[in-house]
């Protein structure tokens, strides 16, 4: 399996969800609990931290304000992303009623060693998106 996909409906306007997936302080409230750095421009530096997992480095690949955000990150903590050690994460936002349909796709698993199980990532994204759907209406 090369990729995992998770999709949720978020009871918040697209601009709120956009801020939740692109602003470091908000991103850290539902995903990178140890903190985040996001230089929101193609090629911009990205760092995601978890106390129990370490610091993961990456860079922004895509920015379509209010619609699509993508970043590539090294799947091992403390190293820079290079071909063969990095996955691509893409968020796509679609307005739906009073809220937002959010699709997350993480791809690149076929280029990684067997230690990186896509099913684990699918579960992690499921948990994270559940946290986001709870948080977003209050933002």
Image (cartoon, rainbow, N blue to C red):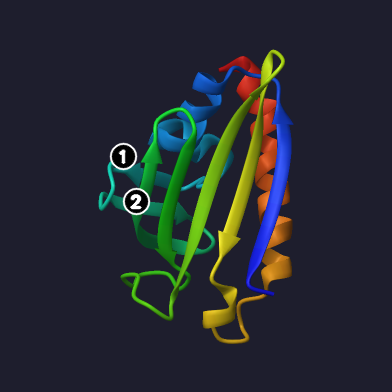
The residue lying furthest to the top in this view is 98
Residue 2 versus residue 73: which sits nearer the camera? 2
At a point 48% along the width and 70% down the height, the residue shown is: 75
Quadrant for residue 77, please give it.
Answer: bottom left
Image quarter (top left, top right, bottom left or bottom right) of the C terminus? top right
Residue 20 placement (x, y as % from top left): 51, 31
Label 2 sits on a secondary structure element that is strand
Residue 118 placement (x, y as % from top left): 68, 70
Cα distance between the residues tagged 1 and 2: 7 Å
**Label 1 with label 2: CB-CB less than 8 Å:** yes
Residue 12, relative to residue 94: is it above or below?
above
Q: Is residue 96 left or right of residue 112?
A: right
At a point 44% along the width and 49% down the height, the residue shown is: 70
Q: Is residue 100 left or right of residue 75?
A: right
At a point 58% along the width and 74% down the height, the residue shown is: 109
Mark 1 burial class by Cα count in 10 Å: few <14, some 14-19, many 20+: many
Quadrant for residue 84, please give it.
Answer: bottom left
Q: Which mark is residue 60?
A: 2
Earlier in the chain: of badge 1 and badge 2, it is 1
Label 1 sits on a secondary structure element that is loop
Quadrant for residue 97, please give it.
Answer: top right
Mark 2 burial class by Cα count in 10 Å: few <14, some 14-19, many 20+: many
Residue 68, relative to residue 4: is it above or below?
above
Q: Is residue 103 left or right of residue 76?
A: right
Q: Which mark is residue 109?
A: none
At a point 49% along the width and 32% down the height, the residue shown is: 67
Which residue carries the number 1 mark?
A: 40
């Amino acid at each position: 399996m090369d990729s995992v996909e998770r999709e949720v409906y978020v009871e918040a306007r697209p601009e709120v969800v956009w801020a939740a997936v692109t602003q470091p302080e908000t991103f850290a409230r539902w995903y990178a609990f140890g903190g985040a750095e996001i230089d929101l421009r193609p090629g911009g530096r990205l760092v995601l931290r978890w106390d129990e997992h370490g610091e993961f480095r990456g860079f922004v690949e895509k920015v379509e304000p209010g619609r699509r955000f993508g970043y590539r990150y090294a799947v091992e903590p403390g190293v820079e992303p290079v071909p063969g050690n990095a996955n691509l994460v893409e968020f796509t936002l679609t307005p739906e009623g009073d809220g937002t349909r959010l699709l997350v796709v993480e791809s690149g698993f076929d280029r990684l060693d067997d230690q990186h199980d896509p099913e684990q990532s699918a579960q992690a994204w499921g948990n994270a998106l559940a946290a986001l759907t709870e948080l977003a209406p209050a933002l």
